[in-house]
Image (cartoon, helix red, strand yellow):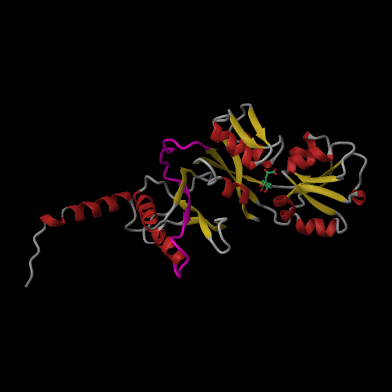
Amino acid sequence: MLGYFGPKGTFTHQALRTVSDDEAIAFPSVRAALDAVRTGEVRAAVVPIENSVEGGVSATLDELIAGSPLAIIGEIVIPVEFGLYAREELRLEDIRQVLTHGHAAAQCREWLATHLPNANITEAGSTAGAAAEVSRPDSHYDAAVSARVAGRLYGLTELAYQIEDNPGAVTRFVLVGRPGPLPGRTGADKTTLVAYMREDHSGALLEILQQFAVRGVNLSRIESRPTKTTLGSYCFSIDAEGHAHDRRMAEALEGLHRICPTVHFLGSYPRADKVRPSIGIGFSDAEFDEASAWVQGLDRETVTRD
Ligand SMILES: O=C(O)C(=O)C[C@]1(C(=O)O)C=C[C@@H](O)C=C1
């Protein structure tokens, strides 16, 4: 059984539907969905991790490394379009209280400021949770910003559609399970990890980046997250192109392990877009193998000096 950040009608639910039609369990938060994976209540869960407008989803980035280890086993990317949904009797000019997810509010900021300048925007656990709340006849809230699917599901009227400030926005979701054998290499893979610096010093981030750069590994996301210990203490959440079984990635991971006190490996999994990284000259598995064989054989070589 799979789980997802719900309730029914969230963008996360739509992302799950693109990979499975089976019955799945909705959880009210990212944390609850990931805890259900940890306890074994579900085999895996879908949660949002990154939006093309708002960036990383902090709740997910933090929960992935809190508690017992988890592994990302797949990713899904879907377009996100928002509408404004209200109870039948309300018109746009009646809307005073809007409820939605923080990421959704941020993606529709301009539209809300222009069309509902006097409305209060309140943050809800999810866009679909907001639509469900607005559908209650005695709700304090007049309208929800959500997916069209959620507006319909909770019997609301669409007052506006495609109200996002950046058309073409997408959100990336990950399928998270318990650690086990890595999904096989496809040639178009991604690896996610969190690296902690040894101590704060000049060039610490550069040292982490160098581990990837000198092995020809491209990064597709890097963001700092507070370690939650002291002010100014950060770790780095990283997506890198490639699989831990690629020689260049394996060597980059070894390098990180040598220089960082802690590295949380969060998985290697197929990329949603199936795009293969371009591998620079000297960075293919064959070239790493050939170079290793050369080093192994050095003591058999005859060195002649003048
Ligand atoms: O509330 C939802 O519908 C979600 O799936 C969460 C979420 C997010 O966390 O970013 C997902 C996609 C949208 O960008 C807005 C909200």
Classify residue 294 by image quadrant.
Answer: bottom left
* Residue 170 horizontal/vertical position (percent): 63, 49
Q: Quadrant of the C terminus?
A: bottom left
In the rendered view, tell whether residue 279 sits above or below residue 42: below
Q: Is residue 224 magenta?
A: no
Residue at 65% across / 40% down in the picture? 12
Given the current orientation, which residue lies at the most extreme front position?
230
Q: Is residue 189 magenta?
A: yes
Q: Is residue 44 visible?
A: no
Query: Magenta span covers which residues?
Result: 177-203
* Residue 214 horizontal/vertical position (percent): 37, 61
Q: Is residue 165 visible?
A: yes
Given the current orientation, which residue lies at the most extreme bottom position?
306
Q: Is residue 10 left or right of residue 161?
A: left
Classify residue 299 by image quadrant.
Answer: bottom left
Residue at 77% across / 34% down in the picture? 153
Classify residue 229 by image quadrant.
Answer: bottom right
Task: Report how many numbered discs are placed on residues in the image.
Answer: 0
Q: Is residue 89 left or right of residue 75?
A: right
* Residue 72 horizontal/vertical position (percent): 51, 41
Q: Is residue 76 left or right of residue 13?
A: left
* Residue 179 horizontal/vertical position (percent): 46, 37
The front one of 40 and 244 is 40
Residue at 24% across / 53% down in the picture? 292
Q: Is residue 293 left or right of residue 4?
A: left
State whether the magenta stretch is mostly helix, strand or loop: loop
Q: Quadrant of the N terminus?
A: top right
